[in-house]
Amino acid sequence: MTDSATLAEPFVHPALFYRGDQEYVDGTVPFLLDGMAAAEPVAVAAPAPRLELIRAELGSAAADVHFVDMTRAGRNPGRIIPSVLRSFADSRTQGRVRIIGEPIWPGRTAAEYPACVQHEALINVAFQGRDVTILCPYDARALSADVLADAHATHPVVIDGGRERASTDYALEGALARCNEALRHPPGAATVRFDADALPTSRDFALDEARERGMSLVRVQDLALVVAELTTNSVVHGGGSGTLRIWAESEQIVCEVQDDGRVADPLAGRHPVRPDQLGGRGLFLVHYLSDLVRVHTGENGTTFRSYVART
């Protein structure tokens, strides 16, 4: 990874600051039309109201655009790179690809936001060297100054007021370090230690706790897979044992697994999974099933935290 943005880099990752619907349309629609004119595949992943603005402005040309509701597909920011961005880009192997991706909007929670910033930073890692342009709109009128500062830190280029310039505050490593914050759990969290022999009982413990806290049958089944993957990951890669915690937070059940391992790959869990792939699916599955995933890793170990809605 590097904090240097070079003109030779084929991957382009600008942040677009917009103020109001007209600036949004002015900054996104020409980007799409230019791509279509150059026979480049184009996609938009944004909140539904923004998709409708673009559709209305494009008219019949909207039929050539791949639209994704980011509030659904990208509710967990950890799903966006493999399941939205690379899913589209990897299926188009010839020429440049253009994508609009808006992962941060007013209403993102305090728990979700660091994962959003981490996602924006990791886009630069995931697409380095590729002929892809990902334009990321930011509502500069509704989002805070701190959010816009993070956009400067995670995007080599910023477009503001119709003017494009290199971001002098681009600092990929610093942004990732800030997102790798220690995760504090509530003192009343139900807790159990586990090792290889105790995997079945620890998983039963977690599911019993989730049911007692009102989790639906369907979501309990999702949580069962999340717990299985995280605890197995600790046994195989995290020193052979770990600590499992579970608690309720608003309308979600939170499952946390802590072990002595360290995650070396910043894109762990964000690599697309091939249909013929035999292993390496665990953390991808955790991101896919969770409504939010937070991770802290360092010299003293790693904590994975999964948020799953009760219903």
Image (spheres, rainbow, N blue to C red):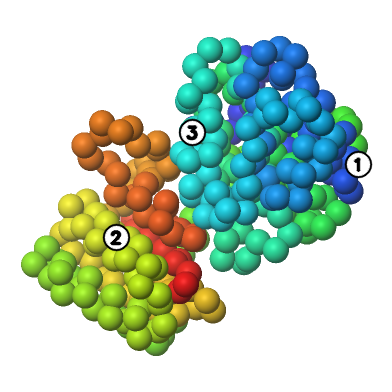
Q: Nearer the viewer, residue 27 or 192?
A: 27
Residue 206: percent from the left, percent from the top? Answer: 28, 75
Residue 160 falls in which quadrant of the image? Answer: top right
For label 2, the crowd category at 10 Å Cα-Cα, with few meaning under 14, some 14 to 19 and many 20 or more, is some
Q: In the visual, does 211 lie left or right of 237?
A: right
Q: CA distance from mark 1 to mark 3?
A: 30 Å
Q: 200 above or below 103? A: below
Q: 171 above or below 214? A: above
The residue under the point 62% across, 54% down is 71
Residue 218 falls in which quadrant of the image? Answer: bottom left
Label 2 sits on a secondary structure element that is helix
Q: CA distance from mark 2 to mark 1?
A: 44 Å
Q: CA distance from mark 2 to mark 3?
A: 23 Å
Q: Which residue is mark 3?
A: 87
Report whether residue 174 is seen.
Answer: no
Q: Which residue is mark 1?
A: 22
| Residue type at the position of mark 2 | Leu
Residue 36: percent from the left, percent from the top? Answer: 72, 18
Q: Earlier in the sequence, mark 1 or mark 3?
A: 1
| Residue type at the position of mark 1 | Gln
For label 1, the crowd category at 10 Å Cα-Cα, with few meaning under 14, some 14 to 19 and many 20 or more, is few
The residue under the point 78% across, 57% down is 143
The residue under the point 71% across, 19% down is 35
| Residue type at the position of mark 3 | Ser
Residue 116: percent from the left, percent from the top? Answer: 59, 52
Q: Earlier in the sequence, mark 2 or mark 1?
A: 1
Q: Nearer the viewer, residue 216 or 305?
A: 216
Q: Earlier in the sequence, mark 2 or mark 3?
A: 3
Label 1 sits on a secondary structure element that is helix
Residue 32 falls in which quadrant of the image? Answer: top right
Q: In the visual, does 163 lie left or right of 208?
A: right
Q: Which residue is mark 2?
A: 225
